[in-house]
Image (cartoon, rainbow, N blue to C red):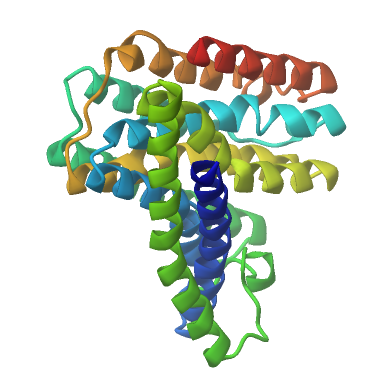
Amino acid sequence: MMDWVHVGLGLVILLLAGDSLVKGAVNLALRLGIPALIVSLTIVAFGTSAPELLISVQAILAGSPGIALGNVVGSNTANILLVLGIPALIATMHTSGHDTRDSYMQMLAASVLFIALAFFGPFTWIDGLILLVALTAMLVHAASAARAHRRAGDGAVVEPVDLEEEDLEGADPSLGWPRILLYLALGLVGLPIGADLLVDGAVNIARAYGVTETVIGLTLVAVGTSLPELATTFVAAIRQKADVALGNVIGSNMFNLLGIIGVAALVGPIPVEPTFLEQDLWIMLAASLLLVPFVFLKRDITRLWGVIFTGAYVAYLVLVLG
């Protein structure tokens, strides 16, 4: 029972600390004059992935790399099937009016690169550098595309700060320096504590129930760390912001593959178990390909698709746990 309490407490601390870190880092960067677009593409993106990153690093340091890899692969599958499926049950997401082809193709490219590296054996520091270089290239491309889009929309060269602060996650113009520093401190202190509690509890649960740490990473840890994306997507669906919902999932999946495993592999080698090569990586890729009708054929994610996505994820859980 205490192990489940540790997992729950660790997850709550991670989510709160991650949110605190994002809020503090975003407002610090804006106060220092860093363009909001750059803040959005870097600090917000990395900050919202901080819980997954800390879990992966802590798992490797604790000698449980299966949790690290399972967390990323399981989260990517959950992000598509669960995070898009459940909100679609409540309200149709009108994705047909939004163009996400460019970012979606980048996500697929990241997935193919990740799977290719997995087949060459454990993820080492060399693989980590390759993934981080790919992430950097995608960030540069995204920044360039965003600036070009805004120039085309305005008919003029944009100002250095080309993204409104009030539209930026965590931005609060009224936030003073003491509170900014407090948010940063809470985030930096809370993340490692939460990661340590969650990883220790997850490892003990795996041993108690006779399942592998990889299975725990693919299920319990993956679903837990996908809760922020689920909450964001749910709110976006209710507010008819389908571009935010789909973009949130695509961006999160790219950062999971390239950023989290990229950094974690620098900490220590991450073995790739046969089950990943035979099953889980391909399920992750298949889930990604399910988005083709919504990205290229301009289809909406209706309630029927919500049922299909959610049902597919339940089937995936049964397969993994079975």
**Location of residue 27 (image quadrant):** bottom right
Count the marks.
Answer: 0
Q: Nearer the viewer, residue 13 or 268?
A: 13
Q: Nearer the viewer, residue 109 or 155?
A: 109
Query: In x, y percent, where is residue 292?
Result: 60, 19
Q: Quadrant of the N terminus?
A: top right
Residue 73 visible within the image: no
Q: Is residue 220 left or right of residue 302?
A: left
Q: Is residue 274 left or right of residue 203?
A: left
Residue at figure coordinates x 23%, y 48% from the top left: 61
Query: In x, y percent, where is residue 4?
Result: 54, 42
Residue 31 visible within the image: yes
Residue at figure coordinates x 82%, y 27% from the top left: 89
Q: Is residue 141 left or right of residue 234?
A: left
| Vertical arrangement, residue 18 with respect to residue 185, above or below | above
Residue at figure coordinates x 45%, y 29% from the top left: 216
Q: Is residue 292 left or right of residue 282?
A: right
Query: In x, y percent, where is residue 28?
Result: 48, 80
Q: Nearer the viewer, residue 288 or 197?
A: 197
Residue at figure coordinates x 65%, y 83% from the top left: 173
**Location of residue 157 (image quadrant):** bottom right
Query: In x, y percent, where is residue 133?
Result: 25, 45
